Image (spheres, rainbow, N blue to C red):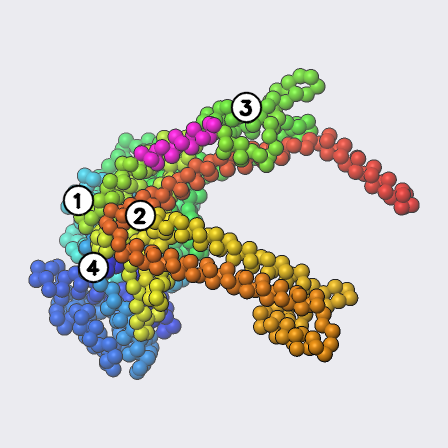
Amino acid sequence: MALKKSELYASLWQSCDELRGGMDASQYKDYVLTLLFVKYVSDKYGGDPYAVITIPADGSFAAIEGLKGDKEIGDKINKIIGRLAEANELKGVIDLADFNDESKLGSGKEMVDRLTNLVGIFEGIDLRANRAEGDDLLGDAYEYLMRNFATQSGKSKGQFYTPAEVSRVLAQVVGITADTRQDQTVYDPTCGSGSLLLKVADEAPNGLTIYGQEMDNATWALARMNMFLHDHPSAEIWRGNTLSNPHRWGEPNGLKRFDFAVANPPFSYKSWTNGVNVADDEFGRFQDYAIPPAKNGDYAFLLHILKSLKSSGKAAVILPHGVLFRGNTEADIRRKLVQQGVIKGIIGLPPNLFFGTGIPACIIVLDKEQAAARRGVFMIDASRGFMKDGNKNRLRGRDIHQIVDAFRRQTDTPGYARLVPFREIEQNDYNLNIPRYIDGSEPEDRHDLTAHLHGGIPQRDIDALAPYWRVFPALRGDLFAPTERAGFRRTGYSAARLPAGQVKAAILNHPEFTTFAARTMGRFGEWRDAHAPHLYSLSADDDPKGLIRELAEDLLARFAAAELVDPYAIYQILRDYWAETMQDDVYLIIQDGWQAAGALRELREERGQKRKETPDLVVNRRKYKADLIPPPLLAARYFAAELAEIARLEAAAEAATAELSAFLEEHCVETQNLASLLAEATNEKGSVTKGGATARLKALTVNSEQETVDSEEEEALRRCLALMEGESAAGRAVSAAQKELDALLFARYDSLGEAEIKTLTVNDKWLATLAGATQAEIERVTQALATRVALLEERYSDPLPRLAAEAETLAAKVDAHLQKMGVL
């Protein structure tokens, strides 16, 4: 069975559970990622004499598997990893984690059990099963772990990871194109775990030569492993302080120059001058500008990167917003950079994206090649485009795409992006703070005093909805009519034709909206028809990442000219569904084939297994998982009659429950003089039970010969028991019908042909879900319009004279009542 991405994530995070408690996340990541590395290279390169990694028989994951339960498991794992490191010149890289450290892993049996369980989890992950872009699957899992480690590690340990979404923005705005050559170079002077470099490499279809430097030893080791895991074993990642001791890469007299550079340096680094001869820097990084402040290294990193670029070089650097407006020396540096034309663009990011800090940051894009011809700086205010993700913010796919599209096209978008000429920047004393040049605030919703006094809806507010009226010209006349006052038409104001509560229904049922919705859904239909053949023919030759890129880009292109609907919102619908569901489905189909992917998988619980899957179907007490086609989908296509019968039985069961509840509510209430009729059948918790009612009825029957029995109580008890039995019988009927349906579904799964599996998956599941979400987004347009129209109607529905008259009338009534009471 192919390894689904979500299952891989869950297994890896389960491995982290084995280590929690003894150490911080910033430490246990070393153990998990080391084992992931050993497992991956063993699965991928084991037995291949021509592989880039040599896997010794006594230095493989198979050797580690044989240690489960061994009293010396920690020491022996260290030795196995050491042999793998020695065979591949990876000493000091993959052998940093001490698997025999009692202070972190416990001693004696505790260590043995913990490491045995940890090895067992990795043993159950078969990375050889990933025939379809397996490296990408694993790379994404590594990224998942890094994000979670950064989240768990807290504020001080997040510097080793740049959020993948931000990395993708940098990678796409730095200037990589389809024509970028493999021998062109990319450099990250503060590369952390290497995630940013890898995102840039992903944008180069022909490949790219990777260079990086990292000061922290453990993080440098992560970066080296990360390069192997992402199939970039030749990447040159060096240890050391970039500012005080930049690696020369064979350049004896200065810095090596690169075609591209990306970086996320530590914000406002206070000790950047340690080891740096700032007065006479041998690399000449500051001589044309000024020496950055001793307690703030933001511009020190930026100037280092600028110096490290070729004459045609380009860079994208993440820095705190303060670099855009801080004064003194930094203002001088900023002025010179602008005057030289090396700053191509500035992108303002949302706050709280990064794990080391919550302050907002920006991306500064440098471009030496076009510096002389540059006439301005292209600015983007992307600070409002994000989603909440726990206690952090996160860029969505649509936010990334919108930023990159705007930057590449260099076109002005009101409130979002514009090319700011140098003359305007000079007039602002070279202050580059984005709000000075782009007003991204929402326009003020002003009230009209005349309308409040005399009624009517201001024409100004109606005209502000012009984008809607261009699409629905007749609808405007159906919603608003000119105001009549004192026998003449009052210009500038209109009256509502419908009550506010009827506006939404009127819009949804309007012929113009029907036409608009059909026209817009037609775009989806064209996209569906264009790509359905490919989806129906998915095979082992397909690339899942290439597939979603093709699907998403074409969907965005088809909706680019759509009226009213935000094309990026439609794009995000597909991206979200891909991440939640479709991605796992596609990997499953590509790796196992349609027939195997569509079959049921029996769940077998193993001893000691912590993570248990929820079954989709239970037949004869055996549990099954439907990985591709959930039972409701199969039932909807083949067992509509049975579903309808279950729905009828469920409705009957709900009615029986409601009838019983109403009866109990009526007969359990105590009146002023009488206890409730069911008081003797009520337990200490205040509930009437079947056992209690039966016992009380039996007691009444026994006593009926000796004394007078309350016939009303007896009747209530019998009625209560009958209703309880009716409720139970209705529930049993539902269960029996569901059991019968489950048996039919089980048999139907076994007989599904490949063509049926494709129809159920592509048509009934993927395309139907996306069509429904797209339709909902179209209807959201009407919701926005209806909400605004209703607000305007309610705001001016009661002008001041009418309110004053009503107030006078009510005051008069109050006075009259008070007079009757003798108060006035």
Residue 789, how many percent across, how many down? Answer: 56, 33
Q: Which label lies toward us, 2 or 4?
A: 2
How far apart in space, not on screen, are marks 2 and 1 (Cα)?
38 Å
Secondary structure at numbered mark 2 = helix
Q: Earlier in the sequence, mark 3 or mark 4?
A: 4
How far apart in space, not on screen, are marks 2 and 3 (Cα)?
45 Å
Residue identified by numbered label 1:
206
Q: What amino acid is labelled 4 in the image? A: Ala
Secondary structure at numbered mark 4 = helix
Q: Main secondary structure of the magenta part?
A: helix
Q: Are marks 2 and 4 in contact (CB under 8 Å)?
A: no
Residue identified by numbered label 2:
760
Q: What amino acid is labelled 3 in the image? A: Gly
Residue 161, how many percent across, how many down? Answer: 32, 56
Quarter of the image with the C terminus is: top right
Number of residues whose C-alpha sits closer than 10 Å to that of mark 4, classed few (under 14), some (14–19) or many (20 or more): some
Residue identified by numbered label 3:
477
Q: What amino acid is labelled 1 in the image? A: Asn
Whether the magenta-drawn stretch holds residue 513 is answered as yes
Front position in the image: 719 or 66: 719
Classify residue 694 as left or right of residue 63: right
Secondary structure at numbered mark 3 = helix
Q: Earlier in the sequence, mark 2 or mark 3?
A: 3
Residue at the (47%, 38%) spot, across then down: 780
Quarter of the image with the N terminus is: bottom left
Classify residue 17 as left or right of residue 86: right
- Give, as a single range, the part of the protein colored magenta: 511-526
Residue 524, how many percent across, how many down? Answer: 35, 36
Residue identified by numbered label 4:
129
How far apart in space, not on screen, are marks 1 and 4 (Cα)?
26 Å
Residue at the (25%, 67%) spot, across then down: 124
